[in-house]
Amino acid sequence: MTERVVLKLGGSVITDKSGACAIDHARLRDIAEELAAHRETALVLVHGAGSCGHPEARRYRINDGLTDDNVPGVYETHTAVSSLNAAVVDALRDAGVEAIGIHPLDLGLAEDGRLVSFETRHIAEMTEHGIVPVLHGDVVMDRLRGSCIVSGDQLVTRLAAALGSRRVGLATDVTGVLQNGAVVPRIDRSTIESLDVGGSGNTDVTGGMRGKLAELLALADAGIDSHIFHVSKIGRFLDDTGHGGTTITAKE
């Protein structure tokens, strides 16, 4: 079976999270060129919403559930994140990567904020033919709330488990998980309690770094390590030559 690598681009890497859907096209081009240089990798790409989706989700209180007042927020939020997804796919295709956007709203169902149904077989088939599926944090329908936000981090854990991936990376705008200005090289459930980890400093409805670590620790419990590193280290991660960041792993 093909070894599939799941890579997530943080929303703050490809957008200015303090703006209104301010896409960093220059960085997207750089990332796309790096990924094009690793075409031999069977890659599944996920990206965060950044400033394209978080403001809309917060304004319409999507995570609080649907009412008559905020139903339009499903459209507004999905449209915002879809526009970013289109920009990511365009950058990849311009660099020669056979990328296709995949929208979680179309194929996922949640219950109280957690995915309970999410089709991945077609995603696995895409990678067998050299296609790079590009997914993103999105609004999805929720059997209890009506709607909720499914973060890119939740998608990463779902995809890695379903696809049997043994290599999971999260490219961020920092060098890893930081404590007192230094990178924490390894985190497991016994060490997480000693870390002072907060949420995002910008508008983020998915829990910021603490939410990210919760997802990745659940993945570690399933026997799959993940790695958080600076976006400039994507090439080294894909080459499996180290990344200088933080590894999230099961307790020994």
Image (tube, rainbow, N blue to C red):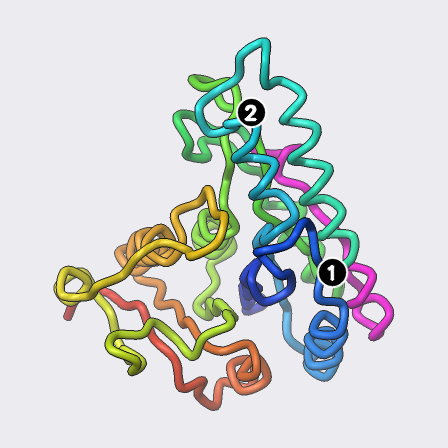
Q: Position of residue 176 (x, y in %)?
A: 39, 75
The residue tagged 1 is: 88
For the residue marked with disc 2, what is the amino acid? Met
Check the image and report above or below for 79 versus 52. above
Label annotation for residue 73: none
Q: Position of residue 80 (x, y in %)?
A: 70, 42
Q: Quadrant of residue 56?
A: top right
Report the side of 8 relative to 158 (left or right).
Answer: right
Question: Which quadrant holds the N terminus?
Answer: bottom right
Label annotation for residue 141: 2
What is the count of numbered marks?
A: 2
Q: Which residues are magenta?
A: 88-108
Residue found at x 43% / y 68%: 166
Magenta span includes 12: no
Check the image and report above or below for 104 versus 124. above
Front-most of residues 22 and 135: 22
Q: How many neighbours does mark 1 have within 10 angstroms: few (below 14), some (14-19), or many (20 or more)?
A: many
Q: Quadrant of residue 33?
A: bottom right
For the residue marked with disc 1, what is the amino acid? Val
Q: Are marks 1 and 2 in contact (CB under 8 Å)?
A: no
Q: Position of residue 43 (x, y in %)?
A: 63, 67
Residue found at x 75% / y 61%: 131
Dot 1: element: helix
Which residue is at the far top?
68
Q: Mark 1 vs mark 2: which is more N-terminal?
A: 1
Check the image and report above or below for 164 versus 40. above
Q: Quadrant of residue 15?
A: bottom right
